[in-house]
Amino acid sequence: MVTCLLPCLTRRCEALAVTRMAFPPQETVVILGTSRDDGNTWATVQTVLGERHVEIVNLSDARFTAYDYLHRNEDDGFLPVVEAIMGKSFWILATPVYWYSMSAQLKVFFDRLSDLITIRKDLGRLLRGKSVAVVASGTDEAIPDGFEVPFQRTCEYLGMTYVGTFYLPYGKDDRASSSHLEAARKVGAAWIS
């Protein structure tokens, strides 16, 4: 369900926008995984959200480390972040495309979801039924092949509903076209009531 928003792929965006889920803003959280707080990914999120106010979790501000099989880091900041967002029904994962994949911040967050099937199964069970969408930005005209696979498979494994990926390409001048921005607004209106 990738939406690249190139002229030949505009139909995919329209299909994504037609799939109305209409989650209320108070049930939505954006999990922002980027190194540049004021960069293109944040601009894309703001365009998708429009005037809707939702909770934002900036993973660059969170203090947690990579997954540890021995769970020596169970007292870092990961579990408090998850506990804070567990009441949200709709998670929007926001990431730039770095080296054909999600950002390092989001990858560490994803890896740490393993804590929820090992040491905090009570939280892991609460993931079932939640919906997940991805908002991504990049400089390539199209999102890389296979980009969605980790999101799709993780959602499937954890019993979450994968909604799809919205990708917004930015030109070399760090600008998106007006038609791409309009598509972002339409997807946001479909996702969040």
Image: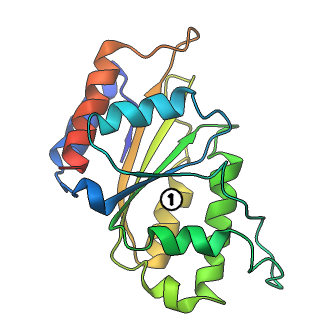
Residue drawn at x 55%, y 43% is 95
Mark 1 lies on residue: 151
For the residue pair 167 and 58, the one nearer the viewer reads as: 58
Give the residue at x 62% y 46%.
102
Question: As drawn, is 75 to the left or to the right of 95?
Answer: right
Task: Choose between 62 and 113: the one closer to the eye.
Answer: 62
Query: Is disc 1 surrounded by few (<14), some (14 to 19) or many (20+) residues within 10 Å?
Result: many
x and y percent of residue 25 in the render?
26, 53
Q: Amino acid at mark 1?
A: Phe
- In this rendering, is residue 50 above or below 130? above
Q: Residue at x 36, y 67 (%)?
A: 88
Q: Residue 122 in the image: x percent, y percent?
A: 51, 91
Q: Position of residue 17 (x, y in %)?
A: 21, 41
Q: Is residue 173 left or right of residue 56?
A: right
Position of residue 106 in the picture relative to residue 8 (left or right): right
Residue at left offset 27%, top offset 28% = 183
Residue 93 rendering spot, x and y as whole percentages: 48, 52
Residue 68: quarter of image: bottom right
Total marks placed: 1
Residue 79, placed above or below residue 6: below
Q: Secondary structure at mark 1?
A: helix
